Amino acid sequence: MKTIGLIGGMSWESTATYYELMNQDVSARLGGLHSAKIAMVSVDFAEIERAQVEGRWHDAGAALADVARSLERAGADFLVLATNTMHKVADAIDAATGLSLLHIGEVTGAAIAEQGLSTVGLLGTRFTMEQDFYRAVLEQRYGLKVLVPDATGVDAINAVIYDELCQGRIEEASRASAADVISGLVERGAEGVILGCTELPLLIRQDDSQVPLFDTTRLHARAAVDKALE
């Protein structure tokens, strides 16, 4: 079994889900007392979030590159970045070590392609929804049409992520609001919706959507176990 190098803490709420999912998956596949081999570094998200807001992506990338190097020294065989938004600095992480980075956008695009969908909605942080670092993977490599919410929807989803989910708060009113945003995407032609923030599955369930939801946390964790057990 290969050792998964997990870059976590963005936020720790969803990183805990990664850890649980990967260990459950290894146990289910191998049985007995088997668990996943994981080397993990969990960062202080407040520092990363401050760099996001201030547009200091180079600094954030340098910080995560340092984490990647520490995981390489710890014996990781490949890297998993437990966040969608920080894949904006995936190139910096890739360049820092000789390890491969299992890209969450690639994993998600492949899952959508398997279902034969052509148009999907994307929910996530403002950065993920409005910038092209994530959408470009889906559009250029998988030929998908990607829809994002209107400005009001972007504001609502972004606020829920940072003000509630990253701080461990699950609010029913926010679940209803997110369901309304999803309905708006479906009305515009979305055949499925990507939960493109690893915290969103803590709030949004398949019952909240009329179309398939793509849980990036679960997809990414499963792909990590696939790679670890190759």
Image (cartoon, rainbow, N blue to C red):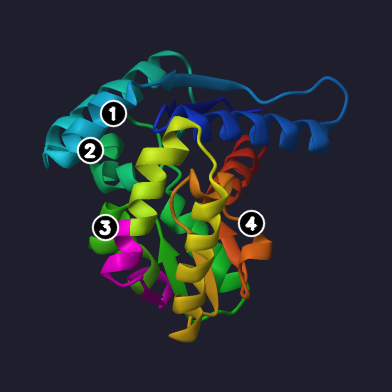
Amino acid type at mark 3: Phe
**The label number, if any, that marks residue 133 in the structure image:** 3
Mark 3 touching mark 1, by CB under 8 A?
A: no
Q: The magenta stretch spans which residues?
A: 140-155
> Is the residue marked by circle 4 packed among few (<14), some (14-19), or many (20+) residues within 10 Å?
some
Mark 1 touching mark 2, by CB under 8 A?
A: yes
Of mark 3 and mark 4, the one earlier in the sequence is: 3
Query: Image point 35% across, 22% down: which residue?
Result: 43
Of mark 2 and mark 4, the one earlier in the sequence is: 2
From the image, tell me which residue sits under label 1.
Answer: 64
Amino acid type at mark 2: Ala
| Residue 195 to residue 102: above or below | below
Residues at marks 2 and 4, CA–CA distance in whole angstroms: 33 Å
> Is the residue marked by circle 2 packed among few (<14), some (14-19), or many (20+) residues within 10 Å?
some
From the image, tell me which residue sits under label 4.
Answer: 205
* Res 112 → quadrant: bottom right
Amino acid type at mark 1: Leu
- Quadrant showing the C terminus: top right
Mark 1 touching mark 4, by CB under 8 A?
A: no
Q: Which label lies toward us, 3 or 4?
A: 4
Residues at marks 1 and 4, CA–CA distance in whole angstroms: 30 Å
Q: Position of residue 42 (x, y in %)?
A: 41, 21
Local secondary structure at mark 2: helix
Of mark 3 and mark 1, the one earlier in the sequence is: 1
**The label number, if any, that marks residue 92 in the structure image:** 2
Of mark 1 and mark 2, the one earlier in the sequence is: 1
Of mark 1 and mark 4, the one earlier in the sequence is: 1
Q: In this view, does 165 lie to the left or right of 117?
A: left
